[in-house]
Image: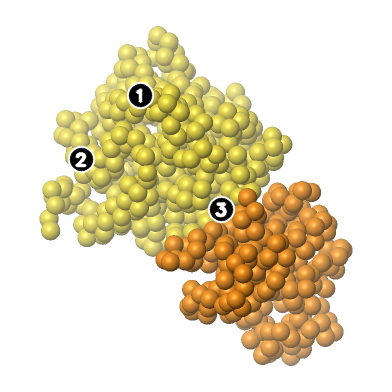
Chain colours: A yellow, B orange
Amino acid sequence: MPGPYDEMWEKLNLDLSAHEHLLQVLGKFYGDIYLSQQGRLKGMEYLDFVLSEVHGLRIQELQAAKAQGRKIIGTFCIFVPEELILAADGVCVGLCAGAEIGKEAAEKILPRNTCALIKSFVGFKLSRLCPYIESCDLVVGETTCDGKKKAYEIFEEYAPVYVMEIPQMKQACDRDLWRAEVVRFKAKVEEITGRTITAEKLREAVRLVNARRRVLKRLNELRAAVPTPISGRDVLLINQVSFYDDPVRFTAKIGELCDELEKRVRAGEGVVPAGTPRLMLSGCPMAVPNWKLPYIIESSGAVVVGEESCIGTRNIRDLVDETGQTLEELLDALVDRYMRIDCACFTPNRERLEHIVQMARDLKVNGVIHFALNFCQPYAMEAFKVGRALEKAGIPMLPIETDYSMEDVEQLKTRVEAFVEMVR
Amino acid sequence: MSERPSALVAGIDIGSRSIELVLLENGEVVHWDLLPTTYDPLKQCRSLLDRVQVRRVVATGYGRRLLEGNPGQLEVRTITEIQAYALGARHLVPTARTILDIGGQDTKAILLTPEGRVAKFEMNDRCAAGTGKFLEFMAVALQIPLEEFGAFALTADKRITVSSMCTVFAESEATSLMARGEKPANIALGLHLAVVSRTVAMLRRVGITPPLVFAGGVAHNPAVRRLLEEALGQEVMVPEQPDLVGALGAALHAWRLSED
Ligand code: SF4
Ligand code: SF4
């Protein structure tokens, strides 16, 4: 049966029947994991709606923006300064890469022992399943981990790719490198969009993105209450949606949701029974629709109250200083803010350990579950140090390595349940 | 059995190879039973439970959820194998600090606090390397009955190294060793050594603290026991019925619940 968006999808050159299958799987998954929850907030209806229209309405909006001459720029990493894209009237979409579909296609050109995230974005492109990638005028890669770095070289043959060099350390010379990269990226964005980034435009963009970060910070402060008023799954979804929704609308909607949360917190209403163990997730990003681990945790008698991850606090902790007057000052502010990101691709990366311990304390968690995607060296290796730092602080940690497939769900359940029994 | 007073509580351990049942009265074991898991584990659980009358059941093992929401039956609670082995082993050896369980499909290493709470645990992941299943496959490959496999390995006159831990690769490695004329007993010992070295690595990750209790079906195997003691340089305590430890732990949990 032809649907309302078929024509648009066809124009975007999607594989219609495979895409239909993807939407069905996603819908079923969403129903099981999200819609089945008890005591959900009214404000989550917006998220349900956005997700149900993830390949529909939002793509239509992107096409409309394109028709007005705006450019769509896709990113895979929170290191890419979105502010520059917005300052040039571009639309920034964080490309998700959280589904297993397309894995077979990806494995034809990538080694099998590549992390699921990389396989996913390559797989999506090769199988023509992602209307976001297909809408992009530019896809921005970055030199974070080796897997991504080399994958972009291959990806380049299928999509317009631009790669930013991300430093590996945080010394003065690294900041210089990063500043040069930010300036180079600004020029690239200006070239693609045909617009000039002025101080005024950049300040406006900085404010816009800061506002979104602030509302997400507010959400995180509210959910830190004991008992927690919202499920970890729902907060993860909100973070995920923040990467591709319209920032102004999103900020307003999450603001409303926070008002609702505030009432709950004031009334002392929790989303789970009192005494439910509180856990924090830490590690690799969980891109849509990777809800596997939070779902397992929250079906094992615990609740997730924090995500120390790029689709979580790493993306919102620091704001860009808005007080700069000149373009140079604003660029410096941007450079400084992004240099503070504590990704495991950096060495050394002590800030992350401190952040994790602090966060675990602030959130009053019973334990931390460290999540690394299989074959992700930076995070899997850092898990050791994270575990030690937490141990010193007297906080138990369970390290999990997994991917997007469902074959290890039973084993994961046993591990997670045993951990919950242990920390209770 | 059906005439038993319902002061009884039961623990049932639904594993990949067998299902064990332990009944307690006032915290003491009064009855135990076991059946192979087969392809219809639920039926096997029912037949074990049908023979007894209990007022509470706690299930553990990888099939622990099987009995949940069983219509018309008493409420069945679940605990993980980790918790069950901790409780069971601690009951048998009150000073136990480390527990090793090698079952049909997985291996677990558990570190306990001095008070007996779980402090840390490790489990093997997706594959059967180093578990009972591995030994089972290898026994078949060498055409030795599983129950005798350990004793057979101990008749070896030489230590050879089997490098593959993958069940499939190890089997082909064993086959090629045989083709080269290696004595089957030596190959068997090599396979046991492989299991033990993997197990020791897991134990070291949780941090071995004596006394160490070795439970699960593979604890029956004398070669694994001896090689473990050798590798660790410490005594390995094996309960009389090592495969009942999980069910015992579950039963103890059931008893605690009914005391509350
Ligand atoms: S984990 Fe590191 S590489 Fe991945 S999105 Fe975050 S900052 Fe980028
Ligand atoms: S999850 Fe790890 S391996 Fe995968 S892209 Fe991110 S940093 Fe690289």
Q: Amino acid at mark 2?
A: Leu
* Callout 3: CB less than 8 Å from ligand 2: no
Task: Tell me residue A107's x, y (percent).
Answer: 42, 61
Res. B196 image quadrant: bottom right
Q: For mark 1, give the secondary structure.
A: helix
Residue bearing mark 3 = A417
Of the residues tagged 2 and 1, which is closer to the observer?
Answer: 1
**N-term-proximal mark, 3 vs 2:** 2
- Which residue is found at the position 36% from the left and 16% from the top? A203
Alpha-carbon span between mark 3 and mark 1: 33 Å
Q: Amino acid at mark 3?
A: Glu
Q: Position of residue B58 (x, y in %)?
A: 58, 62
Which element carries disc 2, helix, strand or loop? helix
Chain designation of label 1: A
Quadrant in which the C terminus of chain A appears: top right
- Tell which subunit mark 2 falls on: A
Q: Which residue is mark 1?
A: A259
